[in-house]
Image: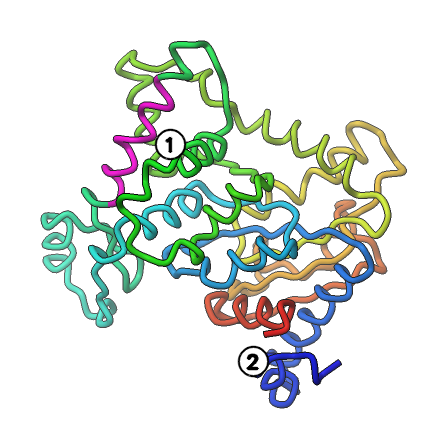
């Protein structure tokens, strides 16, 4: 098997032998084994993964059918597209730990929104998308049509209107890859994203009806139906990048089906891996060990479970490289 692997996978297998590195290899092999057995995989994206350009590896995972469904924050949904259309206008601040309050104010006054060491340009990113997505929102609103947040984004990407702005190789945009594949996305808590805030502002001003945007409850209902139709055979795995609502929301669909719909025959999640730097503490969900999820009817005692306590921007691309045999 090793001879069919690319240099990155071979390097991982030779050198990642202990501690967190070994957990990375075990999780990657478990992901691969789950797919080879006929299982499907959900990937959840929290944190600023899109701004960290995870799309460089994630897009290829989508194209090669290594991911069946994605759950992500509203920020990750929009920031991959922002990077696609305004990359050259981003500003990197490698000394971000040394910034003073005045430095932060200067960034704001110059139209930059900082995410750790990367600053997103207000006009070239947020407002550029707004001018195009508004037309789709308005058209749906006026025609009494309703869509999920990601469906509006898919429509915008597939219309070709953004091609004039592309500033990176489009093959490195995971949202474009997802739109072209039309893979399902769940976006819990979309309202707290920039586009969610903007949509809310139009609702407040009376230009939009809130009901034009399908809600989080509707996402949960849709996800339950998807899971019921896709969890047969070897089941669905759960690959969680970071913590937060992107993971908390979708993992709960299984106990909801089991406990509240009383479908006791529903398979639990059949693989679990979380990449996080959260530590176990009192009441911490993101830092909780996987076994805690057994008591909540999320994971079975036999579910392969992995936790990699590290930086997801480093670890996730390595696992993807393994799965892609790069």
Image point 62% across, 84% down: which residue?
Answer: 10
Q: Residue furthest bottom?
A: 14
Q: Which mark is residue 8?
A: 2
Taking 233 as reference, is 127 left or right? left
Dot in front, 2 or 1 = 2
Q: Is 187 left or right of 10, judged from the image as shown?
A: left
Label 1 Cα neighbours within 10 Å, binned few <14 / some 14-19 / many ≥20:
some
> Is any atom of residue 245 visible in this view?
no
x and y, in percent, of residue 63 in the image: 58, 54
Viewer-nearest residue: 240 or 181: 181
Q: Examine the image and state in which quarter residue 194 appears.
A: top left
Q: Position of residue 81 (x, y in %)?
A: 37, 46
> Magenta includes 121?
no
Please name the residue that numbered disc 1 is placed on.
196
The region drawn magenta spans 125-138
Mark on residue 270? none
- Residue drawn at the location 49% of the way across and 18% of the way down: 146
Q: What secondary structure is the magenta-colored segment mainly?
A: helix
Q: Report how far apart the C-alphas of labels 2 and 1 lie in the structure.
A: 38 Å
- Quadrant (top left/top right/bottom left/bottom right) for the N terminus: bottom right
Q: Residue at x 77, y 33 (%)?
A: 257
Q: Position of residue 105 (x, y in %)?
A: 12, 52
Position above or below: 26 against 3: above
Rendered image quadrant of residue 139: top left
Disc 2 element? helix
Query: How is the structure coloured here?
Result: rainbow
From what the image shows, is residue 231 above or below residue 39? above
In the foreground, 257 or 50: 50
């Amino acid at each position: 098997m090793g001879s069919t692997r690319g240099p990155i996978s071979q390097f991982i297998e030779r050198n990642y032998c202990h501690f967190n590195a070994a957990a990375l290899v075990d999780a990657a092999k478990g992901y691969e084994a789950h797919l080879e057995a006929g299982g499907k995989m959900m990937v959840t994206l929290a944190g600023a993964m899109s701004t960290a350009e995870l799309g460089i590896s994630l897009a290829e995972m989508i194209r090669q059918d290594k991911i069946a469904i994605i759950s992500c924050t509203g920020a990750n949904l929009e920031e991959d597209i922002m990077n696609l259309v305004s990359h050259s206008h981003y500003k990197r601040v490698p000394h971000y730990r040394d910034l003073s309050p005045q430095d932060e104010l200067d960034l704001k006054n110059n139209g930059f929104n900082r995410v750790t060491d990367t600053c997103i340009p207000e006009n070239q990113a947020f407002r550029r998308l707004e001018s195009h997505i508004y037309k789709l929102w308005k058209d749906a609103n006026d025609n009494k049509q309703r869509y999920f947040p990601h469906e509006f984004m898919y429509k915008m990407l597939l219309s070709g209107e953004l091609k004039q702005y592309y500033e990176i190789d489009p093959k490195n945009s995971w949202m474009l890859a997802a739109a072209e594949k039309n893979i399902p996305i769940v976006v819990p808590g979309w309202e707290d994203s920039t586009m969610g805030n903007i949509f809310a502002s139009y609702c407040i001003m009376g230009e939009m009806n809130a009901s034009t945007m399908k809600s989080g409850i509707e996402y949960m209902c849709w996800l339950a139906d998807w899971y019921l139709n896709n969890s047969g055979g070897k089941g669905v795995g759960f690959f969680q990048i970071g913590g937060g609502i992107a993971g908390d929301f979708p993992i709960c669909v299984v106990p909801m089906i089991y406990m509240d719909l009383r479908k006791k025959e529903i398979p639990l999640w059949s693989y679990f891996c979380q990449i996080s730097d959260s530590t176990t503490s009192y009441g911490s969900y993101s830092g909780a060990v996987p076994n805690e999820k057994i008591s909540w009817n999320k994971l079975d005692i036999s579910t392969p479970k992995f936790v990699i306590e590290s930086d997801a921007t480093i670890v996730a691309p390595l696992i993807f490289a393994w799965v892609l045999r790069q």
